[in-house]
Image (cartoon, rainbow, N blue to C red):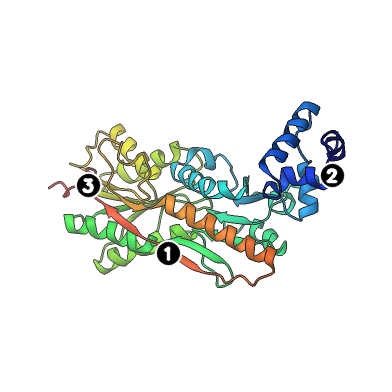
Amino acid sequence: MTLQTIADRVGVSRMTVSNAFSKPDQLSTGLRREILAAARDLGYVGPDPAARALARGTTGAVGIVLTSSLRFAFTDLVATSFFGAIAERLAPTGLALTLLTSADSGDIIPARDVAIDGALIYSCDPTSAAVDYLTRRRLPLVYVDQEPLETVTTINVADRHGARAAARHLLDLGHRRIGLLMSGMHPPHGLIDPADVTIDGYAAKQRLLGWCDVLDEAGITPLVARQPGANPEEPRAAARLLLDRPDRPTAVLCFSDATAHGVLRAAVDLGIDVPRDLSVVGFDDNPLAAQLRPALTTVHQDVEAKGKAAATALTRAIADARAGVAHVPQHHVLPAELVVRDSTAPPPR
């Protein structure tokens, strides 16, 4: 079944039939309806997407490059909100979303092999070769929560500002024994010296800097635990390293709300009351934060705004590339503000 078959049935040119599918504004409503009805009668679905993409020189899809595990896209509440905002903004453009792992699995390298018109680099291991592959393909790129570059449009959050506000909140309450619970793919893990922290990503780096801005000024050396973050049980186990000890902290600053949830669970295991015996502060303000008991004090970032800004920036970069226009990279920094709820209080006497 071809376009010519339908053209012969309706008595129009092949190009007119093609326009009915790809350029509907070129036809009257009545003629287009007649052509589509004939296509349905003949069992014709539409032009082959692969052939159409080849003819146009586009794929109709954009990639989102994640960590080595795509499970993150479906289990992390911040990530799912971010993807939802992107999908909503892309819907009117007709562009589809393709999730790409940054892993290099032998002969299968998604960043090298998957056909896309552009890509968002999000929460991607900076040591991954995926970014290098996409750059060498000369695809339009937008970085999200990555180290800013002058050559690439980047969407960041004021992580350092938000982390400072979180640490200052605990100091204002009177806390002086403070723990940090961090997440990172690469070792070391477990209880570590603050000077040995390995930073896997830009957001983690900025949040640590913000905490240390305040704690260093106050002369406080935090107790630091670090966990891989591959499954929900790891924050709980790492939190026990901070809490199951006689000199445990009276407050814990957490890399994310998911990490803070692990601290709350570990506190229940150990019979530690939050916030009477222990204060806990998260980061992100994901949908779970306000539902936890006690409701979580955290740093809010507007994930919806971040997703929409990322999608808008990428579609603009793709449009510039198609038009042969030099794209002007921009750096967008979205606010991060402390939200005080029920999981923080003055330290026990």
Looking at the rendered structure, the kind of residue marked 1 is Val
Q: Which numbered mark, 1 or 2, is in the foreground of this view?
A: 2
Mark 1: secondary structure:
strand
Instruction: Tell me: residue 234, above or below residue 144.
Output: above
Residue to which mark 1 is pinned: 333
Image coordinates of residue 65 in percent, x first then y, are: 60, 51
Mark 3: secondary structure:
loop
Residue at left offset 69%, top offset 46%: 24
Looking at the rendered structure, the kind of residue marked 3 is Thr
- Tell which circle, 1 or 3, labels the residue nearer the N-terminal end: 1
- Distance (Cα) linking label 1 and label 3: 28 Å
For the N terminus, the image quarter is: top right
Residue to which mark 3 is pinned: 344
Q: Is residue 200 visible?
A: no
Residue at left offset 81%, top offset 28%: 42
Residue at left offset 71%, top offset 40%: 32
**Observer-nearest of 325 and 154:** 325
Image coordinates of residue 181 in percent, x first then y, are: 37, 50
Residue to which mark 2 is pinned: 14
